[in-house]
Amino acid sequence: KNQVEQSPQSLIILEGKNCTLQCNYTVSPFSNLRWYKQDTGRGPVSLTIMTFSENTKSNGRYTATLDADTKQSSLHITASQLSDSASYICVVTSQAGTALIFGKGTTLSVSS
Amino acid sequence: NAGVTQTPKFQVLKTGQSMTLQCAQDMNHEYMSWYRQDPGMGLRLIHYSVGAGITDQGEVPNGYNVSRSTTEDFPLRLLSAAPSQTSVYFCASSYFRTDTEAFFGQGTRLTVV
């Protein structure tokens, strides 16, 4: 069964600190993986996309990694800001073209 | 460029009532979909459409109907609301079904009492 598992479920960090969110998937055959940020009361917004051949991709303070062999991805946030407080959702698509497979998300709280 | 627009943002229904959640996109996307988001469950696909006149069921379609008469609009109908349908509903659109860059609306928070 195609699944996407994220950890931790929630995380609290101090402003300015770094953190890493994890995503493990069992989707096969793999097409690509996206990380979305969902602010409270808003719809998810795409942060970055990772394809099979990509290992690392950065978007400002956000850096995503992908290990297609172990089927793991991570999202690293550097120098966190209060505005980073949100839910981060990992979404995987298979080459079969079936519906997007969503993880349950990691809720990040950045405190001052 | 408005993107994906959902209305209403909030709605309270009584059990047994029907209503339509509206969704419109101005990006000329072929693929549109409806999701519900419940605490601890993540986003679950209700219905989707790959183009005007074509719709199909997702993971949790029971109690919902959709139609796609135009590329821009994809309304979701609740036939007879039940408390189990209390949730936040998101409409999304994208160029292709397999393109995971989905653009989401702001959501409709629905409470069924």
Image: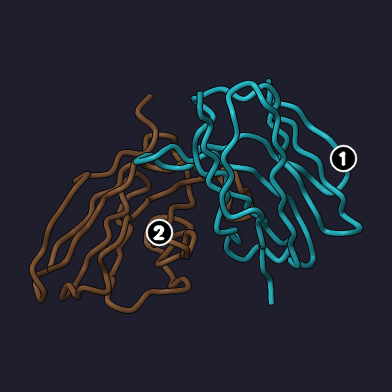
Q: Which chain is brown?
A: B
The local secondary structure at tag 2 comes to: strand
Amino acid type at circle 1 is Asn
Residue A55's tag is: 1
Residue B44's tag is: none
Residue found at x 49% / y 60%: B42
Question: Please, which chain is the residue tagged with disc 2 on?
Answer: B
Residue B62 location, quadrant: bottom left
Q: Nearer the viewer, residue B41 or B96?
A: B41
> Which quadrant, please, contains the N terminus of chain A?
bottom right
Image colour assigned to chain A: cyan
Q: Label 1 to label 2, Cα distance in Å?
A: 30 Å
The local secondary structure at tag 1 comes to: loop
**In the displayed structure, does residue A67 sit left or right of residue A103?**
right
**In the displayed structure, does residue B19 sit left or right of residue A107?**
left
Amino acid type at circle 2 is Gln
> How far across and down, in percent of the image, does residue B48 sit?
44, 62
A72 relative to B65, above or below? above
Q: Are marks 1 and 2 on the same chain?
A: no
Residue A100 location, quadrant: bottom right
Residue found at x 37% / y 51%: B90
Q: Within 10 angstroms of label 1, few (less than 14), some, or many (20 or more) residues?
A: few
Residue found at x 70% / y 35%: A19
A17 relative to B31, above or below? above
Residue B37's tag is: 2
> How far across and down, in percent of the image, does residue B73 sit?
30, 48
> How far across and down, in percent of the image, does residue B84 sit?
27, 74
Q: Within 10 angstroms of label 2, few (less than 14), some, or many (20 or more) residues?
A: some
Question: Please, which chain is the residue tagged with disc 1 on?
Answer: A
Chosen colour scheme: by chain
